[in-house]
Amino acid sequence: MLASMRILPLLATLLIIIGCDRPSLAWVSYDPETPPAVLFKEIDVFDGRNVLRNVDVRITSGQIDAVGVDLEAPADAEIIYGGKWMLLPGLIDSHAHLFSAGERGGMPPEPEMIANAFLYSGVTTIFVAAGDPREQAAVRSAATDGRPMPNLRYGGPSLTAPEGHPIPLMKALLPWPIEWLALNSIAIATDAHEAK
C-alpha cells in the first residue's frame, strides 16, 4: 500500500508532463471572403455515380460553375493539370470523434486541429459521436478565424448502458487511477428516462 502511495505523485506528474506535449498539425487556410479561382484541366471526375474522363472543372467564388472541355480560365485563376488525378465529392465520416485522432501516447491535438485534419484528408462532413459542447465551440471559433472546417453534425453527449462501450475497453487498457478518472467521466443510463 505504501509503495502505491509513492507512485501516485509520480503518476500525477507524468500526466501533467504528457498533457503539456500536444502534437501540432499544419493548418489549411484560405480567405472565405475571396476564395481563389481554380481551373482543373484534363482531369477525371467521379460525380458519385459516373466517371467523367479528361474534363475541365472551373471553380469561381468557391463554387463549381462549369464542367466541360476547353473551358476558359477566370482572370488570376490557378490552373491545375489533372494528369492521373481524379476529383471526388467530399467524403463523409459517419462515426468520428474530435477528442482523439488515433494518436499513440501523449495527449491528442485540439479538436479544431483534428477537424482540420479530416478536411485536409477530403472528409467534408463529419457525424461526431459523443460530441462535447467545448469541442463545438472550439471548431466554430476556428472557422470564424478563416480556417475552413468540415460540416459537423453532432449525435449528442457521450452516453452508454451499464458496462457498455467504452467501459470494458477502458478497464482493459487503462491503469488505475487513470481508469477510475476516465470511468467517472462517462454518463450511464439504464433506461430511456435516465437517458433523457
Image (cartoon, rainbow, N blue to C red):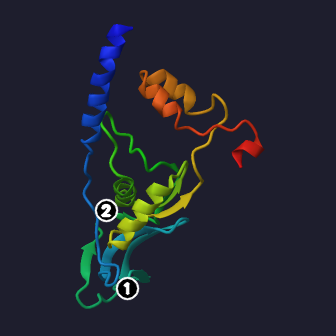
Classify residue 91 as left or right of residue 163.
Answer: left
Compared with 1, 123 (above or below) is: below
Query: Disc 2 versus disc 1: distance between alpha carbons?
Result: 26 Å
**Disc 2 on helix, strand or loop?**
loop
Q: Amino acid at mark 2?
A: Lys
Q: Residue at x 40, y 60 (%)?
A: 138
**Location of residue 90 in the rendering, given as x and y in whole percent from the top left corner:** 46, 64
**Location of residue 157 in the rendering, given as x and y in whole percent from the top left corner:** 57, 49
Q: Residues within 10 Å of mark 2 (few under 14, many from 20)?
A: few
Q: Amino acid at mark 1?
A: Ser
Precedes in sequence: disc 2 or disc 1: 1
Give the residue at mark 2.
84
Q: Residue at x 38, y 80 (%)?
A: 62
Is any atom of residue 111 visible in this view?
A: yes
Q: Nearer the viewer, residue 172 or 80?
A: 172
- The mark closer to the camera, 2 or 1, is 1
* Numbered label attached to residue 61: 1
Residue 57 placement: quadrant: bottom left
Q: Residue at x 24, y 35 (%)?
A: 17
Classify residue 102 as left or right of residue 196.
Answer: left
Question: In the picture, which quadrant includes the N terminus?
Answer: top left
Residue 80 placement: quadrant: bottom left
